[in-house]
Amino acid sequence: MTERIHAPYSPSSSATWILCSFSARNAVPDPPKPKSTKEAADEGTRVHDLFEDFVKNDKAPDEDDSAAEAVERGVRFVRKLEPGELHTELQVQLSDECWGYVDLFNDAPYIVTVLDLKYGRWDVDAMHNMQLLSYCVMLLSMTNAEWFRLVIYQPRGLDEKPFKQWVAHRTQVEAHKVRMLQAIADRSPPKPGPHCRWCKAFQVCPVMNDDAAFLRAAMTRRIEDLSTHDLVRMLRLIRAFGDVKKAYEEALTVKLKLGQPAPDGAGLEASRSWRAWNDPVQAAMHLHSHYGFKGVKPPTPAQAEKLGPAGKQYAAVAAHQPPGELKARY
Ligand code: SF4
């Protein structure tokens, strides 16, 4: 996959700019990212290439490739779709400022499929997925299909289901097109909300600038005197700093390792490490022989499913989803 220029109004960030168009018009070009994020993005690109090669040219990845199983599973899903014309990495466009690339599009007469391969672990849902809906909007002129199947294929995701699907009617896609066009034409001031978390204009947003000054003052007040509005303003900002903290820590470590001066007591020190089994399988067998089941921690239901059919069968009947704890969303 060659290096691509991202559209200002890109489908991948449409969940943010549909709610706050300022974010697309003012995105900063290269926001800080930790090394692990960059490495994961490179690996994602490599896996997309393998997937495309398999779908288009029937060329399977090498057996010992770490992504071989994931790619083959994705292709098996694609081969079972309705007969239609398959496109990979298809460039689609809504306007001069809004375009993108669809990982896979199956153009079948009654229901088309739009699939996005996600190689990260962060759980992404297909239902009302703004990125996929935005691709569907850009495909409207290429198909008369009444239904659109939106698929997220996430082989390494934290969610236990690798394929997440949602079927949208053509009228839902057309309604989304109206929302997209309204956002692209919108020149109103920034509109903060939970979507600020993934905003690419956070660093230049005037609302966040005000909140930064507010945060310093608010931290001198007693927590119980802060309103919910105050707390949300503070937490959005603290979360944003938390999201980039690792990138700055890595940069400082590199500079200190290069011998640059360490100001005010800063410096390098070994991080805490934990003992690990030389051979985890042998350790489990040994401890089980001495202490029975008490000595062995069972794998999680998701890990058990990956062990094989018996693990999958057992997880289906012996695992449950406990209710999640209520926590604040901001
Ligand atoms: S930080 Fe929030 S309010 Fe500011 S531009 Fe981004 S999405 Fe809009």
Image: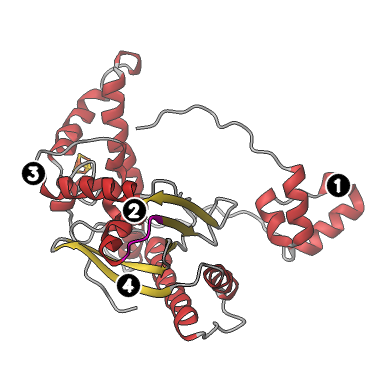
Image quadrant where one finds the N terminus: bottom left
Neighbour tally class for label 2: few under 14, some 14-19, many 20 plus, Cα within 10 Å: many
Residue tagged 4: 90
Q: CA separation, marks 4 and 2?
A: 15 Å
Number of the front mark, 1 or 4: 4
Residue tagged 3: 187
Residue tagged 2: 133
Magenta segment boundaries in residue numbering: 143-147
Number of the front mark, 2 or 3: 2
Neighbour tally class for label 4: few under 14, some 14-19, many 20 plus, Cα within 10 Å: some
Residue 138 or residue 9, whichever sits in front:
138
Left or right: 202, with 324 as reference point: left
Query: Do tag 4 and tag 2 residues touch (Cβ < 8 Å)?
Result: no
Disc 2 under 8 Å from ligand 1? The reply is no
Q: Is residue 78 visible?
A: yes
Q: Secondary structure at mark 2?
A: helix
Quarter of the image where one finds residue 277:
bottom right
Disc on the earlier residue, 3 or 1: 3
Tell me the tag on residue 293.
Answer: 1
Number of the front mark, 4 or 3: 4
Q: Residue at x 25, y 22 (%)?
A: 220
Amino acid marked by disc 2:
Leu
Disc on the earlier residue, 2 or 1: 2
Which corner quadrant of the figure contains ligand 1?
top left
Disc on the earlier residue, 4 or 3: 4
Amino acid marked by disc 1:
Phe
Residue 37's spot in the image, x, y percent? 39, 61
Q: Is residue 86 magenta?
A: no
Amino acid marked by disc 4:
Leu
Residue 278's spot in the image, x, y percent? 72, 65
